[in-house]
Image (cartoon, coloured by chain):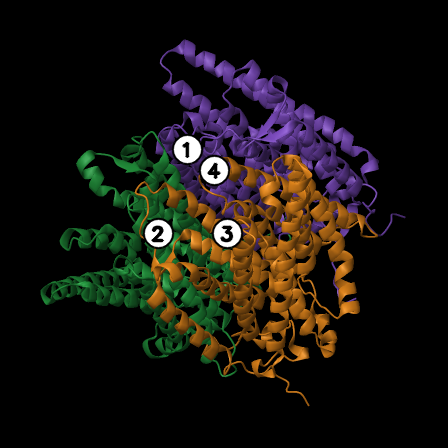
Chain colours: A purple, B green, C orange
Amino acid sequence: MAPQYAPSLRSRLPPLLLFLQIGFIVIYAVYVEIESNIKADGTTFSSFYPEFQDVNVMVILGFGFLCTFLVRYSYSASGFNLLVAVMATQWAIILNGIESWYYRGKIRVDLGSLVVAEMCAASALISIGAVQGKTNPVHLVLIALLEVSGFVLNEWLLQTLLKVPAVNSIMLLHIFGSFFGLTLTWILFRKGSLQPFEKEKFDRQTGLFSMLGSVFLWMFWPSFNSVLVDNHSPGRKLGAVCSTYLALAVSAVTAAAVSALSSPKGKVNPIHMQSCILAGGVAVGVSMSAVHQPWEAMTIGFTAAVVSTIGLKYLKTHMQLALECHDTCAVLSTHGLPGLLGWLAHLLLQIKAGDDHTTAIRFAVFHICTLLITISLSLSMGIITGLLLKWNFWRPPQDKKCFDDQAFWEFPHLAVKK
Amino acid sequence: MAPQYAPSLRSRLPPLLLFLQIGFIVIYAVYVEIESNIKADGTTFSSFYPEFQDVNVMVILGFGFLCTFLVRYSYSASGFNLLVAVMATQWAIILNGIESWYYRGKIRVDLGSLVVAEMCAASALISIGAVQGKTNPVHLVLIALLEVSGFVLNEWLLQTLLKVPAVNSIMLLHIFGSFFGLTLTWILFRKGSLQPFEKEKFDRQTGLFSMLGSVFLWMFWPSFNSVLVDNHSPGRKLGAVCSTYLALAVSAVTAAAVSALSSPKGKVNPIHMQSCILAGGVAVGVSMSAVHQPWEAMTIGFTAAVVSTIGLKYLKTHMQLALECHDTCAVLSTHGLPGLLGWLAHLLLQIKAGDDHTTAIRFAVFHICTLLITISLSLSMGIITGLLLKWNFWRPPQDKKCFDDQAFWEFPHLAVKK
Amino acid sequence: MAPQYAPSLRSRLPPLLLFLQIGFIVIYAVYVEIESNIKADGTTFSSFYPEFQDVNVMVILGFGFLCTFLVRYSYSASGFNLLVAVMATQWAIILNGIESWYYRGKIRVDLGSLVVAEMCAASALISIGAVQGKTNPVHLVLIALLEVSGFVLNEWLLQTLLKVPAVNSIMLLHIFGSFFGLTLTWILFRKGSLQPFEKEKFDRQTGLFSMLGSVFLWMFWPSFNSVLVDNHSPGRKLGAVCSTYLALAVSAVTAAAVSALSSPKGKVNPIHMQSCILAGGVAVGVSMSAVHQPWEAMTIGFTAAVVSTIGLKYLKTHMQLALECHDTCAVLSTHGLPGLLGWLAHLLLQIKAGDDHTTAIRFAVFHICTLLITISLSLSMGIITGLLLKWNFWRPPQDKKCFDDQAFWEFPHLAVKK
C-alpha cells in the first residue's frame, strides 16, 4: 500500500538548496563584482530604479499570488514562487554574464543585469505554472535552472545568429516559457493523478489573493514592457508605456465580455477575469517594436483577450482529454497564444510598414526563423527536463497529495504553545 | 412569482461592452496618437512615471479593494472596479482631448493625459460606491460613462467661465462624484430592497482585503494630490506631498479616537478605520493651493476626520430612513463632507491671506460660484442618469440578489475537473 | 470574579490620542515649516520620492500585515500598526528637529526628514512586535513615543560622542528596537497569561496576508537600506541596492533549506518563510558601509538566515520557559540576532580592510562602544517603559482577552441594517 504521508523531502530539498546556494556564493566570490563606474549625476540610477522595483513586484508578488486560487495550494504557490524566482535570478545573472566574463574576466552586476535576470526568472515562473501542484519544490528548482539555461541559450542564439535586438529576443520569454512548461507537463502526466485533480478547485477566499496578484501584474505591465527600452529615447519608452496601458485596458473589457458571452447564464468567470486581462500586455510586449499607433495596440489587445478567453474556456479540458497534457494555470492561453499572436502582429505590422516586397519577404523569413528556433529549443529543453524529472529519486508527491500544501508546509496549529 | 435566479446579462453586458470597446478602438484609430515630441534628456518621463503608477495603483487596486468588505460582494467590488475604471479612462481620454482635436485635429496621449483620465475615472468610482451592490455591471458601465461626461463638462465650464486653474477644478472630483452618486442612489431606491440589505454585512475575512485597499489609498494619497502640480516648481510639489502626508497622519489618529469615543464600549469600528483615515487626504486635496503651513494641513485633516467619522456613524442610517437614500460605501462621509470642508478651508485660508476686503469678497463670490456650478451639474447629471437606469431594459438585479457575487460571477466549484 | 468583557478603553484611548494629536498640531503650528528652498531642476525631489514611497509602503503595509498571522488578531495588527506608525512619525519629526530648532528657531520638514522619521517609527514597530497581543492600543502608543525618544537620544549620543555617521547609527534601529521590545515583554510577563497563549495560533487564512506583508518588506528592503545613502554618490547607492538584493535572495533560499532541515518530516514552516527571509536585509543594512563585494553580502545573508531560522525554531520556546520572556513576533530572531550579526560583520570587514593593527584596534574599540551604548540605552529605556506600563491605570487586557481583536474592535455584524 502507498504511504499515507507525502515522502519526506528532508534528504532532498535542503541539501540541493544549500549546495546550489553555496555554489552560487563561491562563483560570485570569484567572478562577480558590483558595477562602480556610474555617471556622477545619478539620473540613470534614480530614473531606472522605480521601473526595476515594478518588475520586481511583478515577479515576486504578481506571479506568486496569481496562482493562489487553488483551494489548498496557496502557500506553495506564493512561497515556492519566491524560492524559485531568487534561485533563477542568481543563476541568470551568472549565465547572462558569461560573455562579459569571457572578455573581461569579471561579471558586473547593476540594475540592468538584475532586471534582465528577473525577466529570465519570469520565463521560468511561467513554465512552472503548467506543472503547479503536481511537483515538489525540488522539481521546481531544477525546472527553473534548466529553463533559464535554455532561455539564455535561446537569447544568445537569436542575438548571435540572427542579430535579433536584445529587447525583442527577451520578450519571447512568454512563448519559450509556455511551450517549455507544456512539454514538461505532457511528459510528467500520470494516469493515476487524474483523480486528485478534484482538489484543483477554485476557492472564493484565496481567489481574492489571486485577484490581487493579477491586479499587480496588470498595473505594472507597462513597466515590464518598457523597462528594457533604451533610456536615451524617452519617446519610444513613453510609446511602450502608453501602448501597453491601452492594450491592457482593452483586454480587461474584452475578457469580461467574452467570458460573459460564453457562459450560458451570462456570468463572468473569475479565472478569466484574472488571467485573460493580461493577454494584451503579453501580445503587445512581443510585438512592441512594431507598434506605433494606439489603435494597433488596442486591436492587438482585443484579439489577444478573445483568443485567450476562448482558449481558457475550451482548450484546457480538450488538451487534457486528447493529449494527456494538464496545464494547471493555463499558461498556453495566458502566455502561449497571446505570445504567438504578438509574434504574428509584429510580422504583419512590419510588412505593412515596409516599402518593397524584398524587405518584407526578408523580414518574414527572418521572423519565422526566430520563432522556429525559440519553439524548437523550448520543446527540446522541455523534453530533456521532463525526462530528468521522471526519475523517482526526486520523490514526486503521490497522486493523493497533489495540489496540497500539507505535503510541504508544516502548519504549527498546536505546536506553538510549547 | 419572481424568478429564483438573477436575470441573465448575456444579452445585455457582452454586446454593450463589445460595442463600446470596438467604438473606442475606431475613434482612437482615427483621432488619437501617442505624443512623440519629448525632450531628449528623458527626465520628464522618468520623474513623472512613478507618480503615474502610484495613481494607477490607487485607482485600480485601492478603490477596488476598499469595497471588498461586503461579505458576499468582494469579486464584484474588485473585478467590476477594474472594468469600470478602464472604460471610464478610455472615455475620459477622448473627452479631455476634444479641445485639442478641435484645434489640431488629433488627440495626443501621454502620461499626463493618462493621469487626468484616471482621475476622471476615480470620480466615477466614487459615484459607484454609493450604488454598489444594488446595480448590475451594465448599470455600472453606463454610470461611469455619464458621470465622466458630466465631470469633464463641469471642468470645462469652470475653466472657461471662471478661469479656475486645472489643478483646482479636477480636485473637485470628490464633491462631484459623491453628490452624483447620492442623487443616483436616491432615485434608484426601491422599497422592496430594504430586506436584502441584511446581506450588506461586514465580513472579518474579506474585511482585511478592504483594509489593504484602504492602506494603499492612504499611502499613495500624497501622489494623488501632488501629481498634477507643475513639475517645474518642485517646492510646491514637495509642499503638496508633505501637507497631504501630515493631514493623513492626523486623520488616522483622529478617526481612531472619535470612533472609540462614539462607541459605548470604547471599541474602534473597522469601517471607520478604513474610510475615515482618508478624509484628510480628500480635504487637503481640495484646498491644496491655499495650504502653505503644516499646521493648516493638520488642522484640516483633524476636522475632516471628525466630520467624516461622525457622519459615517450617524448620517448613514438617518439618510436611509429619512430620505430613502441608501449609500453603500458611505461616499457622503468619505468624500462628500471632507470635500466640502476642504472647499471651505480653501475659502477661509484664501481670505485670511488676502490683503484687502475687495479681493476677499471677489474670491468668495468666485469660490461659491465654483461650488454651485459643480453641485448643480452633479445633481442634474445624477437625476438624468438615475432616470435612464430605472428602465427595466437593463435588467436590474432582483431585490433578493443584491449584494451577491453569485448573480454575476460563475464560480467553477465543480466545473473544473471536466 | 473577573469581568467577562475587556475593560472599556473609552476613558483612556480617545483622550490620550486627542490630547497628543492636538498637542502635536500646536507644536507644529509654532515650530515646524515645510522646506521651500529647493533647487529649481527638481531632480532631487523626483529621484527621492519613489524611494520615500517604498519605505512608506514597508512601514505602513509591510510591518502592519506581517503580524496578521495570529488567528484572531489581524485587525489589531494592521490597524494599530498604522496608528502607532503615524504617532511615532509625527513625534520623531519633532525630536529629530530639536537641533535645527535650537540653531534656527524652526524645524524644517522635507522628504528626507519624513524618511528618517519613518525609520524611527520602524524601530518602534519592531519593539511592538514583541508585546503584540498582550497590550492594548494605549500601551502601544506610549511604547512608541518612549521608544522613539530613546532611539533618537541614542542616535544623538552616537553622533555627538563617537562621531558615528548618521547612515550607520540609524541602521542600529533593528538592534535597539528588538532589545527594547524584549526587555518590555520580560517586565510585562504575567504568569496568568500563559493560558491564553493558546489563542496565539497561526491561521491559514490570515497567514496569507502575513505572507503578503512579508513579501512587500522583502521586495522594498533594498530601498530601506539605500534611501539614506547620499544621492550624490550613485555608485554607493547602487552598491547598497545590489548588496541588499543579493543578501535577501540568499536569505530566502537558506531560510527554506534550514527550515526543511530542522523539521522531522522535511517540511517548511510558513512562519520561518515569512520572517527569516528578511534576515539578510537586516544584517546587510547594519553592515552596509563595509560591504563592497557581492559575495560578502551573500555570505552575510546566508549566515543571518541560518541564525535567524535556528533562533526562531529553538530560542523562542526556551526564552519563554527559562526567562519568562514571551516574544510574540520573534523580534529577537528576526531583527535582534541578524542585527548583531551585521554589527559583527561590519567589524570583521573593516578590520580586514584596514592596513595596520593600530587602526584596526581603534576601530574595534569604537565599534564595541557603539554597540554597548545602543544596548544599554535600549535596555534601560525598556525597563523604564515596562515599569510605567505595569500601572493598571492603562487597563491592560485581561489574560483571557489577549490575542483577540474582539477586545478592541467593534464588528458591526448585525448593527449595519439599523
Q: Which of B417 and C235 is in front in this view?
A: C235
Q: Do marks 1 and 4 share a chain? A: no
* Chain for numbered disc 4: C
Residues under labels 3 and 4: Cα distance? 20 Å
Q: In this view, does C395 lie to the left or right of A344?
A: right
Badge 4 is on which residue?
Answer: C233
Badge 1 is on which residue?
Answer: A240
Q: Which of marks 2 and 1 is in front?
A: 2
Q: Where is residue B341 in the image (x, y as percent from the top left)?
A: 29, 68
Badge 2 is on which residue?
Answer: B238
* Chain for numbered disc 2: B
Circle 2 sits in a helix, a strand or a loop, which is it? helix
Residue at image point 59% right, 54% down: C172
Residues under labels 1 and 3: Cα distance? 28 Å
Residues under labels 3 and 2: Cα distance? 17 Å
Q: Which of marks 1 and 4 is in front?
A: 4
Report if the CB atoms under discs 2 and 1 are less than 8 Å apart.
Answer: no
Q: Position of residue A405 (x, y in %)?
A: 72, 51
Amino acid, disc 3: Val
Amino acid, disc 4: Ser
Residue at image point 40% right, 41% down: B49
Badge 3 is on which residue?
Answer: C55
Q: Which of marks 4 and 2 is in front?
A: 4
Amino acid, disc 2: Leu
Q: In this view, does A112 lie to the left or right of B280?
A: right
Image position of B84 with respect to C10: above or below: above
Image position of B20 with respect to C204: above or below: above
Q: Residue furthest front?
A: C358
Q: Residue furthest bottom?
A: C1
